[in-house]
Amino acid sequence: MTIRAVVRGVGHYLPSRVVPNAEFEALVDTSDDWIRARTGIERRHFAAEGETTSDMAARAAEAALADAGIAADSIDAILLATSTPDLTFPAAATMVQRKIGASRAFAFDVQAVCAGFVFALANADALILSGQARRILVIGAETFSRILDFTDRGTCVLFGDGAGALVLEAAEGTGTPADRGILATDLNTDGTHQDLLYVDGGVSTTGTSGQLRMQGNQVFRHAVEKLAATGHAALDRAQLTSADVDWIVPHQANLRIIAATAQRMQVPMEKVVVTVQDHGNTSAASIPLALSVGKARGQIHEGDLLVTEAIGGGLSWGAVVLRW
Ligand code: ACO
């Protein structure tokens, strides 16, 4: 018998404040045209004053539980991918546990920046396969607006806030790629590239939360090459090929990265879920947001073969192949 981690529900939450590109024209030397042409981003959401990562994560989790028809107190574990937690500790996941009433669940955060949701999904899969948990909430939630330098046009126009969540449940499979659930994962890190993308503050250095710094064009170069490679590696591990893919659900950082990766993976853009125009780069929240929006749009259906892939600070990158 093969155990699979199967998706039972998905949901998301976006803060109500929508920030169009034009708002940045008053802050830095940029234009709506430049942002659209170079990134594909048209707008993003920013959290309200006082609205935290765990608030948004809890709303997304409740939406995913409702979609699954599963009660919060039957959840065994909560994994929250975030680099922008409410506090240095405890983990924002513990706050979600309290807010949604998931009283039986153990809860912890996963920090792999924009690759965080892929890392959390792979770890949730391992918890289910090892028998440690049967029902897991996997959440991605970020308030990147709080770590942006609004004088740096190379970064402040790129990011947004939001949250998305999946409910995973253990189910019996046949051990073939026809099974529903997570079929393969591929995780990678190269810590020698820290200087390309980091936050210039932290507990044991400055004692402040710091601001995001990025050499965008260098990250771009790594992204296109590494995302296609990890997507192929995960497909190989699942004994599948690009021809089997119904949807790529990529990290939503830049439309040019998304398109170049799809081309390298030989998957047409008609099979790529794109939300970057509406959300910007929401880091670890971007993939679960895209999964939830993709399902709501009627793109993703039960039985579809999905590849998710992401890269972020570290650099860390990875992919998950799953049948919805
Ligand atoms: N408006 C106008 N001009 C700008 C802006 C802006 N908002 N930002 C940069 N420019 C300028 C630069 O100053 C530069 O000007 P110069 O030639 O006079 O020096 C010019 O545009 C070209 O800059 P590049 O950085 O080479 O532009 P590029 O085409 O690479 O686009 C971008 C920049 C959008 C940041 C792109 O490199 C990118 O998307 N990189 C990847 C980011 C990413 O994927 N991050 C993922 C991980 S995020 C995470 O983990 C938190």
Image (spheres, rainbow, N blue to C red):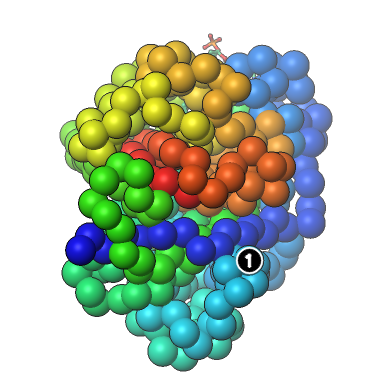
Q: Does 168 sit left or right of 127 as displayed?
A: right
Q: Is residue 150 left or right of residue 184?
A: right
Report the front residue among 296 and 193.
296
Q: How far across and down, in percent of the image, does residue 207 sit?
A: 37, 63
Q: How many marks?
A: 1
In the rendered image, residue 24, in percent from the top left (x then y), is placed at 74, 33
Q: Is residue 274 visible?
A: yes
Residue in view at x 47 percent, y 84 percent:
74
Image position, residue 71 (x, y; %): 56, 82
Write down the quadrant of residue 69 in the picture: bottom right
Residue for badge 1? 67
Is residue 88 at all visible to an observer of this figure? Answer: no
Q: Looking at this view, is 291 or 3 the one in front?
A: 3
Q: Is residue 123 above or below residue 229?
A: below
Residue 147 versus residue 268: which sits nearer the camera? 268
Nearer to the camera, 260 or 195: 260
Measuring 45% from the left and 39% from the top, which residue is drawn there? 306
Helix or strand or loop: what does disc 1 sit on? Answer: helix
- Tell me: 109 left or right of 258: left
**Mark 1 Cα within 10 Å, few/some/many (few <14, many 20+)?**
some
Compared across the picture, whether 71 is left or right of 217 comes to: right
Height in image: 80 above or below 41? below
- Can you say whether 199 is above or below 32 in the image? below
Name the spot of residue 278 as percent of width and height, x first. Answer: 71, 38
Q: Is mark 1 within 8 Å of ligand 1?
A: no
Q: Residue at x 63, y 47 (%)?
A: 295
Quadrant of the drawing holding the N terminus:
bottom left
**Residue shown at the point (49%, 45%) measured from the top left:** 303
The residue under label 1 is which amino acid type?
Answer: Asp
Residue placed furthest toward the bottom: 103
